[in-house]
Amino acid sequence: MWLGIERDSAEWSLRVTVPHLWSMAALPPSPPVWTVELLCPSDSLRIAVVQPELVSEPAWEVLLCIDRSALATLSPAAVRSVIATTLSLLQPEDRLVVVQYRYRAEHIHTFTGEAVSAVVSDTLSILPAGGVAAPLHIAQGALEYCRSVPSTRRRALILLVEAPDKASFLVNAADVARTAQELDVPLFVVQVGLLGERSLWRAVAHHAGGAFFWIATPEPFAIVHRLRWLIRGLHTHYRLRFPAPPRCVGQTLRVRAEQLGIELVQPLADTIPQVAALRHTVCLFQAGDTSIAASYEPIVADLAQWLREHPEEVVELIGHSGQAEPAGTRATLAGQRAAAVRRRLLQLGVSPRQLRVRSAGSSEPVFYFERSVAQQLANARVEVRWLRPELFPYELVVGSVPSEEQALHRVELWEQRGFSAYYEPIVSNGEIAYRVKLWGFATREQAELARRRLAQRYGVRPQLY
């Protein structure tokens, strides 16, 4: 597997690691020859036969950011295991910064390689799971730290993501990738679980010179395995340089070393997709509660500051309730939650004309069957919806599919038909699914007219959202 791709208009550079590099005694007698090919849907282009450069970089500062939001499933013991393994892989010149985050970085620990002990992690305070995750926000913050605090070590950012990013409204994925490129800090994303946007994180990591790893179930040994590859590969790897190939849509890179019996195939994202940027979660609520917990005040405060700085913007606060709450009170609870956020924003200086309030009751759950307190919290939420002219507030749900690839295909199909479309992950009957939506309707009347036309022309009966 390779660790990263650095691309510019003239040259591409790959960092590739294989197990024999982890022990210099196991190196082959002569450097392996690598063949690089660009695979396009209509053709295969052989780029070059590349003589590799063996690179050893012993001094790294690794920023390991670990998701501790309400939907994070790793236990404190599992988090300690991940940290302990990372520590054991450090070299004497290395430095490790461990960040435990929710909406913001809350617990930060720093270690140097020469002072590492496997038992150090046993003394760490592990942040309890709670709140909403803002991994893009955290990644941008870590990169800004790299900008403002010079280091003699090379830096790499590892983002461990479990929950979908529902709170990073101050920064977008393209911002993060662009900053990582500018600072030459590779970004590696380890995504755990079924929730979240894999195509988004894959594209961000590749554009940021890093790599993406997806682990379906939160098994610590699987995370540790990926981290072992990653950190050892940072220290010692093959570097393959070759002229930038022609671009094509849907391109895949294939790298082979016949001497080693290795073939690596990696799809390359042309752009960073916008998966579901219309809504962000402001806060979650305990069953029956309508008050804003202190842990969500930073999110509300950031939203208030942003609205004060952009007085032309208008947002809709949408209140939701959980399936576990009494059916007769769900609509009322949802409305009271949205109203509570509105009151707090007004107290923080936001103009009333910038705020709209709506209760969705329990009609738009993240989890259709709540099997844990965390899932109930995820449903009992207040979201902010951006009522920008270019986005428009009304949407039509035109179906759900079981895979992200199918969702991407459906989005492309609807866009070919002349609609604006996107998709978002949901959980139905305990399984991940992807809901496809059409947007761009300024009024309910426009959306209703589109519903009738879709039924007549395409035989679909979309749901107004």
Image: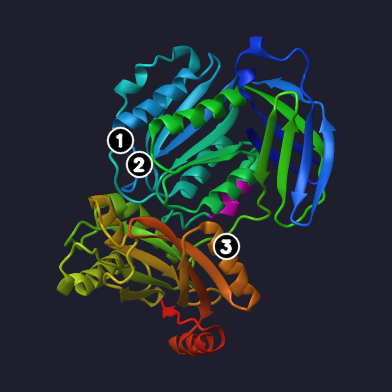
Say what secondary structure mark 2 lies in: loop
- Sequence-wise first label, 2 or 1: 2
Say what secondary structure mark 3 lies in: helix
Q: Amino acid at mark 3?
A: Leu
User: Which quadrant of the figure contains the C terminus?
Assistant: bottom left
Image color mode: rainbow
Q: Amino acid at mark 2?
A: Arg
Residue at the image position 75 percent from the left and 48 percent from the top: 39
Q: Is residue 4 above or below residue 442?
A: above
Residue 68: mark: 2
How many numbered discs, if any? 3
- Neighbour tally class for label 3: few under 14, some 14-19, many 20 plus, Cα within 10 Å: some
Residue 339, by quadrant, is bottom left
Residue at the image position 50 percent from the left and 39 percent from the top: 142
- Sequence-wise first label, 1 or 3: 1
The answer to whether residue 166 of the structure is visible from this angle is: yes
- Residue 402 x %, y %: 46, 60
Q: Amino acid at mark 1?
A: Ser
Magenta segment: does it hold 66? no
Residue 414: mark: none
Of badges 2 and 1, the one in the foreground is 1
Cα–Cα span, label 1 and label 3 = 33 Å
Residue at the image position 20 percent from the left and 63 percent from the top: 290
Cα–Cα span, label 2 and label 1 = 10 Å
Chief SS of the magenta region: helix
The residue indicated by pointer 1 is 75
User: Which quadrant of the figure contains the N terminus?
Assistant: top right
- Residue 10 x %, y %: 83, 43
Which portion, as a residue range, is magenta? 172-178
The residue indicated by pointer 3 is 408
- Residue 119 x %, y %: 34, 16
Q: Is residue 406 above or below residue 21?
A: below
